[in-house]
Image (tube, helix red, strand yellow):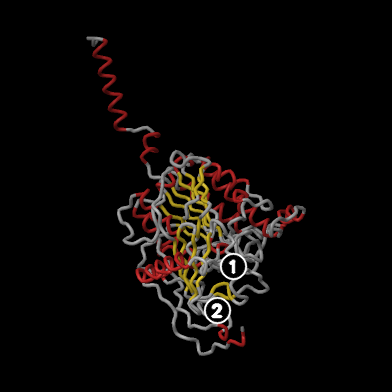
Amino acid sequence: MTLPISKTFCVALLLICALHSCKPSKIDIQEHKKPNIVLINIDDLGYKDVGFMGSQYYETPNLDALAQEGMIFYNAYAGAANCAPSRACLISGLNTPRHGVYTVSPSDRGNTKTRKLIPIKNTDHLNDTIFTLPQMLKSAGYITGSFGKWHVGKDPNTQGIDVNVGGSAKGNPGKGGYFSPYKIDNITNGPNDEYLTDRLTNEAIKYIEKNKDTTFFLYMPYYTVHTPIMGKEELVVKFESKSGQNGQNRPDYAAMVYAMDQNVGKLLNALKQNGLEENTVVIFTSDNGGIRAISEQNPLRAGKGSYYEGGIRVPLIIKWPGKIKPKSTSTVAVSNLDFYPTLQNITKPQSKAKLLDGVNLEPILYGGQLAERNLYFHFPIYLQKYDQLKDQGRDPLFRTRPGSVIISGEWKLHEYFEDGELELYNLKTGIGEKNNLAEQNPTKTKQLYKELNKWRTQTKAPVPTKANEAYDPTNL
């Protein structure tokens, strides 16, 4: 017996509905899947070492394209002025007083006779009790991989990383280390003269392809552009024929920047080819300011290791298709301390960090506003100058002497513990930090000094007070 047409239609409709309820479409799955996360952290890349931030000498077409697809942050800061503390801030979500990593040990660097104080002892690596960013993401269901410089512990696998290539406690690739055979840990040698930046990208692409059907976190902390400055010969030749500009004129460094950009392009293309681009958050930044003797960041003062703007301002792009408007920009002051709380809020892990010093950036990312807050930096240590370096520092002997910094809106206050000196700058009218306004504006100086002291008390930030008996002012 044949069913009436109306009943046949109803049965078919019910079957279709049942099938769809059992097997949601790929589109539905993608809409409800947590985003993959790619965090690219370049080593020692200066604020203006890329085209999208204004360089006319370095060539970064892939990063310039990425900037057009996401949001550029023009007031982005590292958590600290050199690699170890900055990376510790990023991975822990905690400011330096809470984890104790202030520099690459020891903290009493430079001629002992030129140091007035005994600096606070440095902690080499993050304590195992700290709930790291990768551990948080694993709690949210992510596979985690790191490809390159880890530097916040001896073994990334004990700090939340599932797949590690090239990462350990080491902070640079060693002499001649950008070409195979390599001088770093946890990587096999490639063919002779294989370039490390290329190799790390290739390993990361394999990781993407293997885990494309899962949800993954890809941490890409390239060793480049850290010293030794070593570019591919053909790229060095390319830039030897190009005129430098505004303190940027080294062909070998330009070659490193160009190769880095090429590899970022390969990485982003791998996301596209594997159908992952639309559901991936991409963050591109640097761990601290550039070395001024290698590449100037004018008009920013100083460079890596200094807490003037040249040492802590960094390039930053965040892209998330469908969430972040392309070609958008922000002038809000943000920090790499903000990555952890932002990603934690996006991924909704089962276990969350109990304490974080950054803020969730989602309001800015989606076109809204962020509540006003201050940025703080604490460095109770000494960091000697580079050889033959005119780095625009406070004195010719050190990039950093013990002190703290607060950035509040357009204002920035430096405090130095050796002599109690205060320096006040208006970053809106004088980003080069050349005109100390502390005496001209005592009200603002007093206000920021009070807020800085309050923050140090809250975070139990150690301040060096013990005099160095070996100090000899005749050596200055």
Q: Give the quadrant of the N terminus.
A: top left
Q: Residues within 10 Å of mark 2 (few under 14, many from 20)?
A: some
Residue 144 to residue 28: above or below: below
Q: Position of residue 30 (x, y in %)?
A: 40, 38
Q: Quadrant of residue 372?
A: bottom left
Tell me the residue at 45%/69% (across/down): 378
Residue named by callout 1? 183
Question: Which is more foreground, mark 2 or mark 1?
Answer: 2
Element on which disc 2 rests:
loop
User: Can I make out residue 88 in this image?
Assistant: no
Amino acid on which disc 1 is placed = Lys
Q: Earlier in the sequence, mark 2 or mark 1?
A: 2
Give the number of marks.
Answer: 2
Q: Give the quadrant of the C terminus.
A: bottom right
User: Can I make out residue 293 in this image?
Assistant: yes
Element on which disc 1 rests:
loop
Residue extending farthest bottom: 469
Disc on res. 109: 2
Q: Position of residue 263 (x, y in %)?
A: 59, 51
